[in-house]
Amino acid sequence: MNDMYTMNWNQLQRPIPEWFSEAKFGIFIHWGPYSVPAFKDEWYSRHMYSKGMPHNIHHEKTYGSLKDFGYKDFYPMMTGAKFDPEEWADLIVHSGARYAGPVSEHCDNFSLWDSSVNPVNSVNYGPHRDVVGECFSALRKRGIRTLATFHHQWLWGWFMSTDPDADVYDPKNELYYGPALPLETNRYDPWRYPDEKFCRIWREKVREVVEKYSPDALYFDSRTFIIREEDRFRMAEHFYRHIPNGILTYKQEDFPADIGICDLERGRFSEPKSFAWQSDDRLEDNITWCMVQEPRYRSATNVIHQLCDIVSKNGNLLLNVGPYADGSFHPDAVKELYAIGDWLKINGEAIYGTHPYKAAMEGPTYIKDVNYDVSKIQEQLATGEESQVEQQLLTSRDFRFTSRDNSLYVIAMGWPQDGDWKIRTLKSGTEEISSVSLLGSREPLHFTQTPEALIVHAPSEKPCNHAYALKLSIK
């Protein structure tokens, strides 16, 4: 470390930007050469080099030996023939997301921007397009905040293979895979941490994106702790100096608290938090963050319920969707994103710009503290299979609460079978309620507070599907 350089993390502490607190919902997009084989998951680029793993067996059966057909050989097959940043931006707008962006660089050393730091990028290879630059331009025209996500600390040891004849060990391929390293460097917490050159390039990639594209938010995947502290600090300091109203998100304890937003991968909190946080999860119902063969997608109802739960506890939801190698999205993914956006058009008042109420939830479903933590990452590294994270589904008897100004929103996860919503949290003696309405409905609602519950009689027609937001005026 440079002895003349003084790090003071406290000087990087800052309030959360208002735009991020109000946004609540974002989208990011996993797209890269791994979208070509579209087999199992986005870790294909790593596990194809691990002899005996499903990715490796599939690869050698489909494409040949690792010596003759390596990950670099997928580059020209990522054509991006149907990549249209305007269509991507329109889809994001229709989804109701307020910030978004493509994965800037995954773990595979393939940068999706016009990079002078890394010649292995989407302008020189693959689609021959500046994916980050074009997407940011289209998003900004529509008033969407921009997000750049970085996973490239994983590159340290990522491609090291148990096959000594794999193309990753050929010195002429160092451009694509980095220098050959001891196999143990592919562990989550290796004995040999990245050298000075690797850390410098790691930081220069982020610096280049910040200076060329000015993202509103930076997202860092797990394992960032292996980067030298000086480089992490210089990166964060440069970002906040260049984008004073920006925000950085990170996982585990890879950065000090209060200099950014803690992100829980596929995670939730059981109780509301005094601090802002983010959960990143995927629309995909397969165990993947990228396009795979025979993809499946979660229902809009499932995602909307998750969003309501997270927002009620002071969090944001960052949802992933992955396109085909040609840059187009599966029709089923588009359908569910449209449905989420249609719901938000009616009920967004109960989501955007809200704050937690003194009670976040009511109902029979208890949401546990969950996270794709280090133990699950270690398991995935060892087996090649992503570990499951228990995701509790909300029922028609569950409610979530949000608030803004003098309004309290009670979001019911289902339509009452007997015609009445019964909200025990707001029984007589709790809040003095002057009126109750249902977002999207013009019918006046009859309500009464009893010693057991606030009882609201539902209107004759549903204004939407998935969930129903009651707006209460508090005296």
Image (spheres, rainbow, N blue to C red):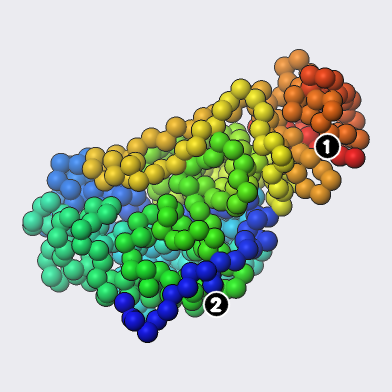
Mark 1 or mark 2, which is nearer the start of the sequence?
2
What amino acid does circle 1 point to?
A: Leu
Viewer-proximal residue, 140 or 223?
Answer: 223
Q: Quadrant of residue 382?
A: top left
Q: Which mark is residue 51?
A: none
Residue 243 location (% of width, % of height): 57, 73
| Residue for point 15% across, 56% down | 183
According to the image, label 1 marks what residue? 472
Residue 428 percent coordinates (x, y): 84, 25
Q: Residue furthest left?
A: 165
Q: Residues within 10 Å of mark 2 (few under 14, many from 20)?
A: few
The percent coordinates of residue 316 (x first, y second) are 59, 49
Using the rendered image of the protein, determine whether residue 70 is visible from the camera's viewpoint.
no
Residue 364: percent from left, percent from top: 61, 22
Q: Is residue 5 left or right of residue 448?
A: left
- Seen in the picture, residue 411 relative to 79 is either above or below; the reply is above
| Residue 148 seen | yes
Location of residue 1 with respect to 264 vertically, above or below: below
Q: Splitting the image into 4 quarters, where does residue 232 fall?
A: bottom left
- Amino acid type at circle 2 is Arg
Q: Quadrant of the N terminus?
A: bottom left
Q: Secondary structure at mark 1?
A: strand
Q: Which residue is mark 2?
A: 241
